[in-house]
Image (cartoon, rainbow, N blue to C red):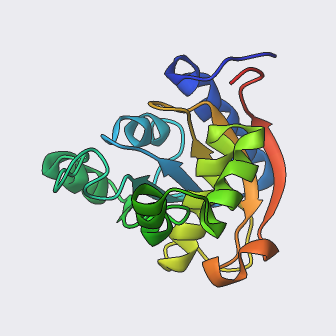
Amino acid sequence: MKITAGSQNTELVLELAAKEAIQENIKNVVVATCSGATAFKLQRLLTPKEYNLVAVTHHVGFAGPGVDELSPENRQKLLAEGFKVLTTTHLFAGIDRAFRFKFQGIYPAEIVAQSLRLLGQGVKVATEIAIMALDAGLIPYGEDVIAIAGTGKGADTAVVIRPAHSHKLFDTKIKKIIIKPYEF
């Protein structure tokens, strides 16, 4: 199956990720979501009562100074439904990005991010959010998780990953690419 990058794949990606979680008994699922829409769609397939579902948003300020893309209403709804919600500095951005914007050039976190983008933006984001969720203590250490992400809005990528803490980044293992865009 060949898909192109973009939100038109969200339903398919979520279905394949849920199928993998059920078949492989993977109880921890991390999903990138800006508005909450992708997380709410995931909930139709995997319930927070049976799975540890973690919604990872853009950091506040990503879309503009002081802007939180996840509305307070959707944040509360996700939490009430049993999701864990993580809004924090992006692993592959942070202060390295500030140096890049100010002084140009490339810095270690950006090299890692660009290397992961060789497999597509979704693989980079899936790796990033899995490590961020582990660092925040929202998923257990030493277990495979499913990470769902995309290129822009929606989801077009799902992977099985065993994240390591950020200070042990290179111990992270992407075990399986469930689906990713053929063209990106």
Front position in the image: 181 or 72: 181
Front position in the image: 4 or 136: 4
Query: In the displayed structure, would residue 146 be above or below residue 28?
Result: above
Query: In the displayed structure, would residue 75 be above or below residue 166?
Result: above
Task: Please state if 130 lies on the left or on the right of 53 as rendered.
Answer: right
Quadrant in the rendering for residue 34:
top left
Identify the image quadrant of the N terminus: top right
Task: Please state if 182 lies on the left or on the right of 156 as rendered.
Answer: right
Which residue is painted at 47% across and 32% down in the image?
Answer: 152
Quadrant in the rendering for residue 55:
bottom left
**Among all residues in the image, which is located at the extreme bottom?**
167
Provide residue 128's location: percent of width, then percent of height: 59, 59
Provide residue 140's location: percent of width, then percent of height: 62, 77
Which residue is painted at 41% across and 44% down in the image?
Answer: 33
Query: In the displayed structure, would residue 150 be above or below residue 11?
Result: below
Provide residue 16's location: percent of width, then percent of height: 69, 33
Task: Please state if 169 lies on the left or on the right of 134 as rendered.
Answer: right
Evaluate whether residue 127 shows in this view.
yes
**Among all residues in the image, which is located at the extreme right?**
175
Provide residue 21's location: percent of width, then percent of height: 70, 49
